[in-house]
Image: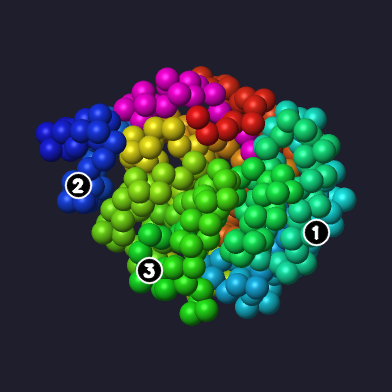
Amino acid sequence: MDSRLRELVEKLAVEHTLADDEYFDLIEHRTPEAAELLAERAVAARQPIYGTTVFTRGLIEISNICKNDCIYCGIRRSNRNVKRYRLEPDVIVACAREGYELGFRTIVLQGGEDAYYTDEVLGSIVSRIKEACPDTAVTLSMGERSYESYQRLYDAGADRYLLRHETADPDHYARLHPVEMSWEHRMQCLRDLRSIGYQVGAGFMVGSPFQTTVHLVKEMRFVEFFKPEMCGIGPFIPHHDTPFAHKRAGALELTLYLLSIIRLIHPHVLLPATTALGTIDPRGREKGMLAGANVVMPNLSPVAVRKQYELYDNKICTGEESAQCRGCLGLRMNLIGYDLAVDRGDFR
């Protein structure tokens, strides 16, 4: 193994930071041997904090209606081929109850930026879930909203908010999004969430169009600076009805490599092995755990709508019932020495 790479891995494991040129070298000149060492150090860093526990988040995809036109996204506003849907509040609460009975203690409500879900409607759903499932954390992933909106939802009982920043570089952000969206506003939303008191999740796509190693260095620096409680990264996967349909997908090996680096930068972070990882490799989520991840997000949405929430092509688990989804993941984790927890899985 290259002595320079070994030196950088060991330095990161101890100091949890590198200089920009060191991050660049570690990423740009990566080797299988460096990836193996990084994964070993990442698992060792996670062990005293979270052990071999895998936290589950029950994901309910409440709407694929979105006002935005993000260039990479399958449910973008201008895609006329999407069969649109929106779940009614009673259906959402019923999904959460089912998840609770299956052992989920975090419910994630995710959707496009759908104007139907006003603060009143969404806040009521959150309150009903908290009443029905009192020891459950509610995470929202409903896009950009005002400070006042985030505050009202927090007051209604929301505990966490996921808002992937997608890229830490403003110019790169502009190449992935329509002109009416701005990187500066996305960052302000993240700051607002943090100031209100949410546990905040950020994240980015690996291998998105136009991404370079310089961009990835900025991602590592962002994780250092912002220290999100959760950081969701997954490979870019193109969708056939977007302008990026023919772009190359992000690589599994680079995603795993970056998961390990992020764990060493921020040992306490809640780090998902995403559905996208499982989409590009049949054992992607297991490999994510072995690279330092500690969260999975099985789908609790009604089976009838799962195929319609298609952010990218070939998404897995669109035909499984909720119990199947959890049971399958539990078995997969057991086979690599990990256990699904019946636990809120809070940041520690």
Tell me which amino acid carries mark 1.
Val
What mark, if any, has residue 170 been given in the picture? 3
On the question of residue 339 being in view, the answer is: yes
Q: Callout 3: few (<14), some (14-19), or many (20+) C-alpha neighbours within 10 Å?
A: few
Element at badge 3? helix
Residue 118 left/right relative to 329: right
Mark 3 / mark 1, whichever is N-terminal: 1
Q: Position of residue 285 (x, y in %)?
A: 51, 37
Nearer to us in this view, 14 or 340: 14
Circle 1 is placed at which residue position?
121
Q: In the rendered structure, which segment of residues is drawn in magenta?
A: 40-59
Residue 174 falls in image quadrant: bottom left
Q: Residue sitting at 36 percent across and 52 percent down?
A: 222
- Give residue 19's mark: 2
Crowdedness near tag 1: few (<14), some (14–19) or many (≥20) residues, C-alpha within 10 Å: few
Q: Which of marks 1 and 2 is nearer the N terminus?
A: 2
> As shown in the figure, which amino acid type bears the numbered disc 3?
Pro
Foreground residue, 197 or 320? 197
